[in-house]
Amino acid sequence: GGTTALTIDSTGRVLKPVIPYGQASCNVAIASVNKVQLTSNIITGGGLTVDQTNERMIVPVSGLYRLGFTHLVDGGITANTTVNIRRNGTVIQGSHGQTTANSEYGHLSTNIIQVLSANDYIEWFCIAGQTHNNANYNNMYVYLLG
């Protein structure tokens, strides 16, 4: 495939400029039983698509991918918050956090390595509680490992 798919610079660093990746943030509070919106700070490359209409990321090629998220949750509003990652509509991983009435915020995060097929899509759902409305803290990502 030529030299654009993989380069080695003069110091020996290996660069993969066309590897599929995507990241997006959510700047609205997402309440229980709702899909996490991909609203801002969107970056993509290597053919990965961020579909803001359906709030999902679509991978272009089969391979081993790392998927994950981090979310800030409001303490005192709800005691328990759970966010799941779904592949083609099926839950594959999640994270659950509990805050107390006197706390200000809580934190949720998870990541997982999955074999995905071309055109698989990844979505994030808040299935209990509520996330905080700040794109600086609510991020979702997908990238190809190999």
Image: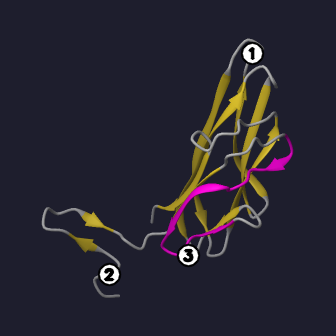
Does residue 113 appear anywhere in the picture?
no
Measuring from the top left, give residue 3's x and y in whole percent. Answer: 28, 83
Nearest-to-viewer mark from 3 and 1: 1
The number of callouts visible is 3
> For the point 64% across and 40% down, which residue is it?
134
Q: How is the rendered protein coloured? A: secondary structure
Q: Residues within 10 Å of mark 3 (few under 14, many from 20)?
A: some
Which quadrant: the N terminus? bottom left
Residue 146 magenta-highlighted: no
Image point (30%, 67%), residue name:
15
Question: Residue 61 got which mark?
Answer: 3
For this orientation, the residue located farthest to the left is 10
Q: Residue furthest bottom?
A: 1
Residue span colored magenta: 32-51
Q: Earlier in the sequence, mark 3 or mark 1?
A: 3
Please name the amino acid that badge 1 sits on. Thr
> Residue 32 versus residue 27: which sits nearer the camera?
27
Determine which residue is flagged by label 1: 100
Which residue is at a point 61% across and 44% down the rendered structure image? Answer: 135
Pointer 2: what residue? 4
